[in-house]
Amino acid sequence: MRKILESKATTRKRLATLPISEKVKLLEQLRDRALAIANSPLKRRQVHPG
Amino acid sequence: MKATLEVINQMQADGVIGQYAIGGAVGATFYLEPVATLDIDVFVSLQKAPGSALVSLAPIYGYLTARGFKVEQEYIVIGGWPVQFLPPGNALIEEALNQAVETEVEGVRTRVMTAEHLAAIALQTGRAKDAARLLQFIESGTLDADKLDGILRRHGLVAKWEQFGDKFRSNE
């Protein structure tokens, strides 16, 4: 578990130090993914549990 | 995002908006790792409408819709990004807008709130996602402690900061 947490922290640090142009590309990818998840049938089922 | 910022800069050059600064999750991304967000929060200084004590976003909407940009709920989609234009709602945000730093994104100049102001606004706003952002700022070590302390004191946030610290420490 400690190794996993350290690895995550390292990744976060690496991402934080990227140039802003690279971060913007990641932001756009993250936004597209968030929209895809928001539009998934599973998400709709959660919203209307019936 | 380059196209988005170019349009916002043109709005400023055309006098539709005054000074502006990017805040919210996109603003935080200038200092932290990127996090998923659907929109860009752009804080803008606006002139009060003649004969009114209120500021109006109508000139922004009028300018952009006349140029074919689409309004979606409280956003206007510019360059593929939903943009929310927000007048500063309190003294902290006003100060954050005034003291924002100039930078560039893909060769386009823009202004972004400082890390300390973004952290203080997250503390003040206090939603779950704001707490998460504030923790990210703290963990990243990007905050200037003296600068943040001054902001917290000026805007009556010291007690809230201490409460946040207590809560954070109790969850460790």
Image (tube, grey):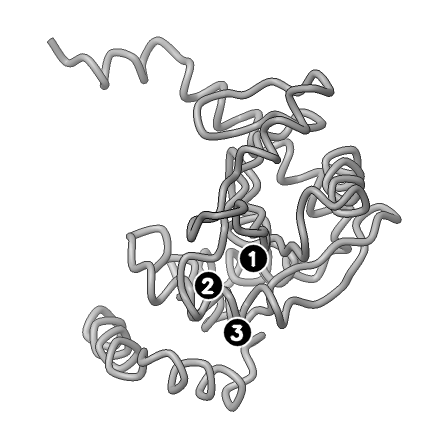
Report whether mark 1 lies on the same chain as mark 3: yes
Q: For the residue carrying disc 2, how many other residues have a C-alpha within 10 Å: few (<14), some (14-19), or many (20+)?
A: some
Q: Quadrant of residue B144?
A: bottom right
Q: What subunit carries mark 1?
A: B
Task: Give the mark, 2 or 1, whose residue is nearer the N terminus.
Answer: 1
Under mark 2, the amino acid is: Gln
Residue at the limit of the structure toward the bottom, as seen here = B146
Q: Are marks 1 and 3 in contact (CB under 8 Å)?
A: no
| Tag shown at residue B136 | 2
Q: Are marks 2 and 1 in contact (CB under 8 Å)?
A: yes
User: Can the viewer see residue B152 in this picture?
Assistant: yes
Task: Give the mark, 1 or 3, whose residue is nearer the N terminus.
Answer: 1
Under mark 1, the amino acid is: Ala
At which x and y percent is residue A22? 75, 46
Q: Residue at x 53, y 51 (%)?
A: B48
Residue under label 3: B116
At which x and y percent is residue B129? 36, 51
User: Can the viewer see residue A15 in this picture?
Assistant: no
Task: Give the mark, 3 or 2, whose residue is nearer the N terminus.
Answer: 3
Compared with residue B159, is residue A29 higher up or lower down, i.e. above or below? above
Discs 2/1, front: 1
Residue under label 1: B28
Under mark 3, the amino acid is: Glu
Q: Quadrant of residue B67?
A: top right
Secondary structure under the numbered disc 3 in the rendered image: helix
* Frontmost residue, B13 versus B24: B13
At which x and y percent is residue B39? 53, 36
At which x and y percent is residue A39? 42, 14
Secondary structure under the numbered disc 1 in the rendered image: helix
Q: Gap between marks 2 and 1, in whole Å?
A: 9 Å
